[in-house]
Image (tube, rainbow, N blue to C red):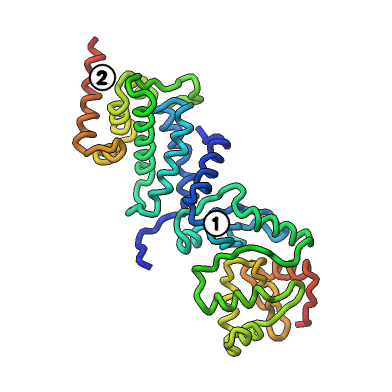
Amino acid sequence: MTVPTDLDLRFLEAAAREGLLDVGYELHDTPVGTLLVGVSERGLCSISYDPEQELDHLARTFGARVLRVPNAADDARRQLDEYFEQRRQDFDLELDLTPTARFAHQVLDELGRVPFGTTTTYGTLAAKVGHPRAARAVGTVMNRNPIPIVLPCHRVVGANGALTGYAGGLDRKRLLLALEGAELGLA
Amino acid sequence: MMEVVIRQPFERFYLEHRDGVLAHLRRLLGAQAAEDAFQETFLRALRAYPKLKHADNLRAWVLTIATNVAVDDRRRLRPQVPDVPDIATLDEPLPREELRELTAGLPPTERAAVFLRYGYDLSYAQIGDALGSSTDAARQATSSGVRRLRREEKR
């Protein structure tokens, strides 16, 4: 005996309505794959290329009441669609970075200011947060970016213009930069 | 971090147990009432989930909550009417068919206790949690249910 869809929905909607969730998420198909998009009560807290693993990470970070709810994060998902359809360059969303440590938080704030269609380097970001020699640490922050795409770590490249790395894989980084029409330096 | 209990994301817990909970509630309440009880069961589970002290036997834990909801439901709706599930709407043969029919004439609390003891093999302590009573009261409800069944058998 399986639970009928409408019964399932009634519970999920009631759970979200009563504010019982630490994170509500939905899976969202995009040109870079199926993403987990999650919101806490404070705002968008997660975009992930690896939904299964992210579930555990969210449970550890925000609390175990992580549940897939239809319409969760619908604002973020709509803006992602617009971005991939090239009808949007900037995201207008509340973000929840509360579990992020201070340095990472500063770097991510700065990252959020890197304009659409441009690239910057790890070293430049490091300098902007007042630690010019912390390029490597900035790389680590990029690698653990909880909200990729919206916080555009794909726009950060090596000093020589090399793509360097991306938590979602270099193919995705290339695709995102191509979508934005970013000029890539030769490397 | 002071947290020592490893809790899986509620999503996985829900997917693993929702079918079993609905089947359990249908047996106790019939198909119609089971739907409301289903939502209430998982809302209660969601509220209690962060306070859960252990991660063992979550199936027994959630069936206990479901039984609790079912007992509340019966008390509220039809305190004196015997509990007869809506057999026509059950869409597959039940492993506990015999027990279900056998207990159909029992008062709700005794029926739930007998069902949980012999259908789900729960301990009296767990049944007590489910019924909102002590372990002893759960043992008593179970044995008085069984006695009642024996009396009816002899009739």
Assess disc 1: are there few (<14), some (14-19) or many (≥20) residues with their C-alpha within 10 Å of its C-alpha: few
Above or below, comparing residue A60 to residue B99 in the picture: below
Name the chain letter of the residue that bears numbered label 1. A
Residue denoted by label 2? B149
> Residue A95's quadrant in the figure?
bottom right
Quarter occupied by the C terminus of chain B:
top left
Query: Looking at the rendered structure, which numbered label has been put on residue A52?
Result: 1
Left or right: residue A91 compared with residue A14: right
Asked whether the beta carbons under mark 2 and mark 1 sit within 8 Å of each other, the answer is no
> Residue A127's quadrant in the figure?
bottom right
Left or right: residue B77 compared with residue A7: left
Quarter occupied by the N terminus of chain B:
bottom left
Q: Position of residue A6 (x, y in %)?
A: 57, 36
Residue at image point 24% right, 41% down: B125
Q: Secondary structure at mark 1?
A: helix
Name the chain letter of the residue that bears numbered label 2. B
Q: CA distance from mark 2 to mark 1?
A: 49 Å
- Judging depth in this view, the residue of B111 and B95 nearest the camera is B111
Q: Are marks 2 and 1 on the same chain?
A: no
Query: Looking at the rendered structure, which numbered label has been put on residue B71?
Result: none
Residue at image point 20% right, 30% down: B140
